[in-house]
Amino acid sequence: MTRYEIILYWSDEDEAFIAEVPELPGCAADGATRQEALANAEIVIAEWIETAKELGRPISQPKGRLLFA
């Protein structure tokens, strides 16, 4: 399990729950339920980090709860 903040909300447009990871630009997942969106976010976070490593891009350390969200 990762320690990045995940913002979870319902999207009428997508008709799904969305899980965004603000500390990792462009990192988001969706799901029919909150649990599914959260599980998918964990997978996408791991893939995001793996891709960033392969490309030699910087990876932010998890900061926990963000105050601006």
Image (tube, rainbow, N blue to C red):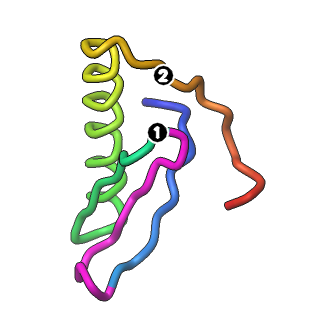
Q: Position of residue 2 (x, y in %)?
A: 47, 30
The crowding category of the residue bearing disc 2, from other C-alpha atoms within 10 Å (few below 14, some 14 to 19, many at least 20), is few
Q: Position of residue 14 (x, y in %)?
A: 23, 79
Q: Earlier in the sequence, mark 1 or mark 2?
A: 1
SS assignment at label 2: loop
Q: Are marks 1 and 2 in contact (CB under 8 Å)?
A: yes
In the image, which disc is placed on residue 13? none
Q: Residue at x 70, y 46 (%)?
A: 65
16 or 22, which is in the foreground? 22
Q: Please provide the residue range marked out in magenta.
A: 12-23
The crowding category of the residue bearing disc 1, from other C-alpha atoms within 10 Å (few below 14, some 14 to 19, many at least 20), is some
Does 13 sit above or below residue 26?
below
Does 1 lie within the magenta span?
no
Is 37 placed left or right of 62 in the picture? left
2 or 54, which is in the foreground? 54
Q: Amino acid at mark 1?
A: Leu
SS assignment at label 1: loop
Q: Amino acid at mark 2?
A: Ile
6 or 39, which is in the foreground? 6
The Cα atoms of the two marked residues, 1 and 2, are separated by 8 Å
35 or 12, which is in the foreground? 12
Does 13 sit above or below residue 40?
below
In the image, which disc is placed on residue 24? 1
Does 53 sit above or below residue 24?
above
Q: Quadrant of residue 47?
A: top left
In the image, which disc is placed on residue 59? 2
